[in-house]
Amino acid sequence: MAGKTQKLLSLLDGQPVIPVIKIKDVEKAVPLARALAAGGLRMIEITLRTPDALEAIRRIAGEVEHAVVGAGTVLNPKQFDEAAAAGSKFIVSPGLTDSLVSAAANSEVPLLPGAITPSEIMTALEAGIDVLKFFPAEQAGGTTFLRSLASPLASVRFCPTGGISALNAEEYLAVPNVVCVGGSWVAPDDAIRDRKWDVIESLAREARALKPV
């Protein structure tokens, strides 16, 4: 799956933060994606945690030219296939299973699966996946744990997600095996509820400018 890893990284295109979004009202999906993309965060993860998630992905994929939309919280091959059919350009899972690896192998859509332990990471490497989600990042040991993986598993890069905010994102980005972080702070629930797209665009612009410290 080396080619798909490169495809995933090319979609990211240097973006330091992937917004992780839960859509409760599908009518807000398109303006939200437009605000994030206008702020420089084109790659957007819509989690499959709400009934409107797939329709939100479908609308963003069809209506927001500059957005690169993907599906998160994908737990099984059925969800993988549904998300891909809806227009997802990448798939994110909190963990790694044989069935998800098989689904990804039969699809052009790259998979970003979660892995924490050395055994899980080695399983991903055997499947040809070397860019992984590290989730839940803060609860699993944070930057200290990630740094400890850098030497024995030097070829692996991570996108930590879980407990990451504007306050600690740059600390994660400074870790040598971290390629980006995932977080929801760029699109707060209240800002989405109140349709404050200018606020979200501003937060996205600030996140796009984050640098390792």
Image (cartoon, rainbow, N blue to C red):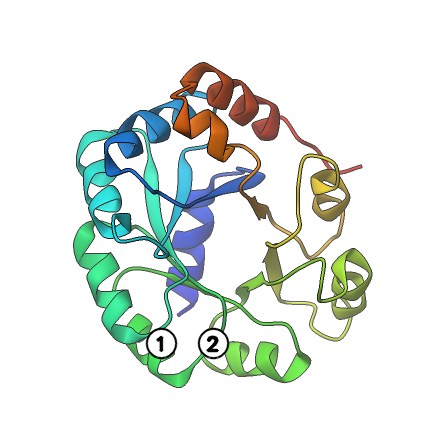
| Viewer-closest of 61 and 136 | 136
Residue 100, which numbered label?
A: 1
Residue 199 drawn at (x, y percent): 50, 18
From this view, report whether residue 113 is shown above or below residue 97.
above
Residue 96, which numbered label?
A: 2
Q: Quadrant of residue 79?
A: bottom left
| Amino acid type, label 1 | Leu
| 152 on left or right of 1 | right
From this view, report whether residue 30 is shown above or below residue 104.
above
Name the residue: 62% across, 66% down.
Answer: 156
Q: Do we see residue 146 in this rendering?
A: yes
Q: Residues within 10 Å of mark 2 (few under 14, many from 20)?
A: many
| Amino acid type, label 2 | Leu
Residue 6, which numbered label?
A: none
Name the residue: 23% across, 40% down.
Answer: 61
Q: Quadrant of the N terminus?
A: bottom left
Q: Residues within 10 Å of mark 1 (few under 14, many from 20)?
A: many
From this view, report whether residue 150 is shown above or below residue 41.
below
Residue 157 drawn at (x, y percent): 61, 60
| Viewer-closest of 176 and 32 | 32
Name the residue: 19% across, 38% down.
Answer: 59
- Check if mark 2's residue and mark 1's residue have beta carbons within 8 Å: yes
Name the residue: 53% across, 37% down.
Answer: 15
